Image (tube, grey):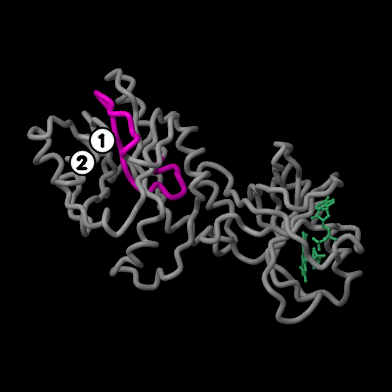
Amino acid sequence: MQVFRDPALFPFLTNAVVTSGTFDGVHVGHQRILSRLREVAQASGGPSVVITYWPHPRLVLGPPPTHPELLALQLLNTLDERIAKLEDAGVDYLLIVPFTREFSEWTSEQYIQHLLLRTVGARQLVIGYDHRFGKNREGGFDYLSQHADRYGLTVEEIPREDVDAVGVSSTRIRRALLSGDIATANRYLGYCYPLTGTVVHGQKLGRTIGYPTANLALTEPLKLVPARGIYAVWAITTAGSRHQAMLSIGVRPTIGADLEQTIEVNLLDFSGDLYDQELTLEFVAWLRPEEKYQGLDALTAQLALDEQATRAALA
Ligand SMILES: Cc1cc2nc3c(=O)[nH]c(=O)nc-3n(C[C@H](O)[C@H](O)[C@H](O)COP(=O)(O)O)c2cc1C
Ligand SMILES: Nc1ncnc2c1ncn2[C@@H]1O[C@H](COP(=O)(O)OP(=O)(O)O)[C@@H](O)[C@H]1O
């Protein structure tokens, strides 16, 4: 997959088969659109192209008027994760349009003329039934199909039934993760929810109880952090090795009151220095809520049980 972050550098294509959208999560609903995109591209012999936006439009525009409660933007994917998932889906070209206020003011007509036709060279479009574009989300499938002939475009809509059949939305996935329901989130995503961070120094208590924990500082501050609790995860190091691991997201009530929330992971059957390395976690299962124990001995005994539960969940 060839990736372009500047529309001015995108190589004009002829016969491009294009879809566009935010694709946060690249979940199984998005994956349907992407697999249809690939089919149409293969049938026509043209390249498949995804146009996506960064930063997330809501970061620039604020919460949608219909959902004013969505103040804190919580992303399912970092840009790197999104790129990797689009590549897995077999996309040939990815154009990441810098989403600015100015771009948000483009009319549907400008969007089609400048971006789809002149920059990309679109010939066919494949879009989800609820896809909107242009200023105030004015453009959509109806607008496109009314004007398709004039533009020399063909437009295919992925119908609501197809998208609803998988019953998934980014909102449902966010809700599942925020309640610790990893099984539902992963089913909707079609892969294990990832979280990446750099290993930073903590209080050096972990090693004294036989369970050193790598403390993560997230690389993408807007990335959604699942509910507080204890999880079985895979931990992947920069070198690419995968380790069974147990993760705690919480405020460590056993250690003290009013502590900051930390994201800490103990890698099973591993010893070595991880400080300053990047670590990626893949969530597999929820194990239990965080509890306050009567001292470090009780916590350590619980960690031994968590270790067993982790091995079982990842076996
Ligand atoms: C799998 C796992 C489960 C944990 N569960 C709890 C818990 O239920 N309650 C709690 O107070 N701390 C819990 N902790 C956090 C420990 O208190 C923490 O690892 C310890 O404070 C070491 O901190 P340090 O890395 O700053 O040295 C857990 C940690 C791990 C890795
Ligand atoms: N199995 C392991 N899992 C996690 N970290 C480990 C492991 N073995 C060694 N380490 C190292 O130990 C550090 C964690 O030790 P810990 O005493 O909890 O210190 P800190 O409070 O700085 O996290 C990790 O950052 C990592 O460099």
Choose top left, top right, bottom left or bottom right for residue 60. Answer: bottom left
Quarter of the picture holding the C terminus: top right
Does residue 257 appear to the left or right of 12 in the view shown?
Answer: right
Report crowding for label 1: few under 14, some 14 to 19, many 20 or more residues within 10 A (C-alpha). some
Q: Which amino acid does label 1 sit on?
A: Thr
The quarter of the picture where the N terminus appears is top left
Q: Name the residue under label 2.
A: 114
Q: Quadrant of ligand 2?
A: bottom right
Q: Nearer the viewer, residue 78 or 164?
A: 78
Above or below, 159 against 308 in this view is: above
The reply to whether discs 2 and 1 touch (Cβ–Cβ < 8 Å) is yes
Side (left or right) of 16 relative to 194: left
Residue linked to disc 1 = 119
Q: Position of residue 63 (x, y in %)?
A: 35, 67
Above or below: residue 4 compared with residue 253 = above
Secondary element under disc 2, as helix, strand or loop, is helix
What residue span does the magenta drawing correspond to? 8-30
2 or 1: tag closer to the N-terminus: 2
Look at label 2 and name its amino acid: His
Mark 1 lies on a secondary structure that is helix
